[in-house]
Amino acid sequence: LLNEYINNYRFGFSEDLRKKVYDSGIENLYFSYAGEINSNKGFYYRIQGGSLLIEYDNIQNDANHVHTVVRDLSNDWAESILKNHYDTQH
């Protein structure tokens, strides 16, 4: 399941994310699930560990409206221009 998400990114980014996840320890990832086992009912799951957070939410419109997100919590809002400035200029 983890690789399904990571492989959806362009190659360079996906390999960087995969390395970060495995370097921080695949054994440190946790999976949680809420909802019915029957796929016709709404459900939610989350994969989290290290700096990775993946959420899948399918509870709206009789479980017919999916939201999913993949976040790198160490760089949550893309590149940190201010941090890069401080690191290189100060």
Image (cartoon, rainbow, N blue to C red):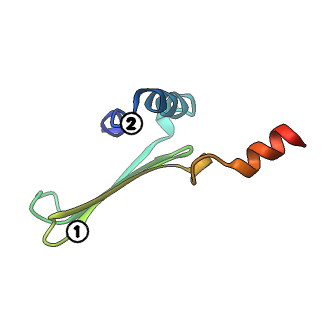
Q: Residues within 10 Å of mark 2 (few under 14, many from 20)?
A: few
Give the residue displayed 83% in from the left and 37% down from the top.
88
Name the kind of residue labelled 2 in the image.
Tyr
State how far apart marks 2 and 1 are (Cα): 25 Å
37 with respect to 74 (left or right):
left
> Mark 2 or mark 1: which is in front?
2
Name the kind of residue labelled 1 in the image.
Ile
Please determine whether, in this image, residue 36 is positioned above or below residue 54. below
Q: Quadrant of residue 77?
A: bottom right
Which of disc 1 and disc 2 is earlier in sequence?
Answer: 2
Give percent across and percent down for residue 8: 33, 37
Q: Quadrant of residue 39?
A: bottom left
For the residues bearing labels 2 and 1, Cβ distance under 8 angstroms? no
The quadrant of the picture occupied by the N terminus is top left
Give percent across and percent down for residue 45: 32, 56
What secondary structure is marked by label 1? strand
Give percent across and percent down for residue 83: 75, 48
Q: Which residue is mark 1?
A: 59
Give the residue displayed 46% in from the left and 42% down from the top.
29
Q: Which residue is mark 2?
A: 9
What secondary structure is marked by label 2? loop
Q: Residues within 10 Å of mark 1 (few under 14, many from 20)?
A: some
Can residue 35 be seen in this snapshot? no
Give the residue displayed 52% in from the left and 27% down from the top.
19
Disc assigned to residue 13: none
Give percent across and percent down for residue 68: 33, 55
Please determine whether, in this image, residue 44 is positioned above or below residue 54. below
9 with respect to 73 (left or right):
left
Give the residue displayed 48% in from the left and 35% down from the top.
27
